[in-house]
């Protein structure tokens, strides 16, 4: 069964360093997402991506964050200068399509997550 | 923005018991998903349920979109059902808005 994969599973970094989190979405999916979950809290949306551009982003997704689809299979989240409060589990997700119609929507499938620890 | 409330926040049951988890949301949504977060932190898709009722083994879910709620039923609970259950309505066609979750503990 196709699945979303993420690497690394755990990343430890020093405050101020840049990190890149990697994801391989399900191969025929067109929409890609990043979410994060600070320990003990609920999951929060960061950004969605379609057709090589950002579709939607939250207030959390400020200038220190960027996303990229560098090739036909990978989808990355870069944090330019990490802060202590960036420590969280980061989840990548993908869906088949997100039609513009209000009444249509496709299921999002999630990867296992990357636990980022900023020291 | 849309508000999502899940109840109860915590639930402790004996193995074999049944339970009902509720999700209320404050606005019209495009769709809704239920997830189980296991003790290792992985998010497992349970149901994609914009409306109506679905069943998968011991689990079933019902969404009444016009009344803005969804229910997740777990029957004959097993210890492996322990974890946090999240409801996440779909918003603006792309974003999922997450509830705070129901933490379920099943005791042997």
Image (spheres, rainbow, N blue to C red):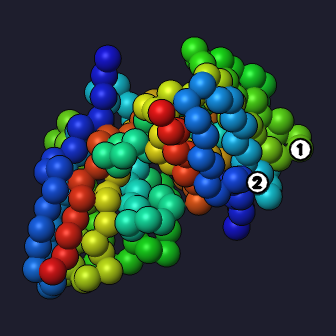
Residue at the spot of label 2? B25
Q: Nearer the viewer, residue B42 or B107?
A: B107
Chain letter, disc 1 residue:
B
Instruction: Give the structural element (helix, strand or loop) at label 1.
Output: helix
Q: Residue A87 lies in what quarter of the image?
A: bottom left
Q: Residue A26 lies in what quarter of the image?
A: top left
Place of residue B28 in the rendered image (x, y in percent of width and height, measured from the top left) = 79, 50
Q: Nearer the viewer, residue B36 or A83?
A: B36
Place of residue B69 in the rendered image (x, y in percent of width and height, measured from the top left) = 80, 44
| Residue name at image x 68 percent, y 20 percent | B54
Q: Are marks 2 and 1 in contact (CB under 8 Å)?
A: no
Sequence-wise, the earlier of marks 2 and 1 is 2
Q: Residue furthest right?
A: B67
Question: Is residue B29 at least partly visible in the picture?
Answer: no
Q: Residue B42 lies in what quarter of the image?
A: top left
Q: Nearer the viewer, residue A108 or A56?
A: A108
Chain letter, disc 2 residue:
B
Above-or-below relation of A95 to A15: above
Place of residue A89 in the rendered image (x, y in percent of width and height, measured from the top left) = 31, 59
């Amino acid at each position: 069964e196709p699945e979303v994969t993420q690497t690394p599973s755990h990343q430890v970094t020093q405050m101020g360093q840049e990190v890149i989190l990697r994801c391989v979405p399900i191969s025929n999916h067109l929409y890609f997402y990043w979410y994060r979950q600070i320990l003990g809290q609920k999951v929060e949306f960061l950004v969605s991506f379609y057709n090589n551009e950002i579709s939607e982003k939250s207030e959390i997704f400020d200038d220190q964050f960027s996303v990229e689809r560098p090739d036909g299979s990978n989808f990355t989240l870069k944090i330019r200068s990490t802060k202590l409060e960036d420590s969280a589990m980061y989840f990548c997700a993908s869906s088949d399509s997100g039609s513009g119609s209000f009444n249509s929507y496709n299921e999002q499938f999630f990867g296992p997550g990357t636990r980022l620890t900023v020291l | 923005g849309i508000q999502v409330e899940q109840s109860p926040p915590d639930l402790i049951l004996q193995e074999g018991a049944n339970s009902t988890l509720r999700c209320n949301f404050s606005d019209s949504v495009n769709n809704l998903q239920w997830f189980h977060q296991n003790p290792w932190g992985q998010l497992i898709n349970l149901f994609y349920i914009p409306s109506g009722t679905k069943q998968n083994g011991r689990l079933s879910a019902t969404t009444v979109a016009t009344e803005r709620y969804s229910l997740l039923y777990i029957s004959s609970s097993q210890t492996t059902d322990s974890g946090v259950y999240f409801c996440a309505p779909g918003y603006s066609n792309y974003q999922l808005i997450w509830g705070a979750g129901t933490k379920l503990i099943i005791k042997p």
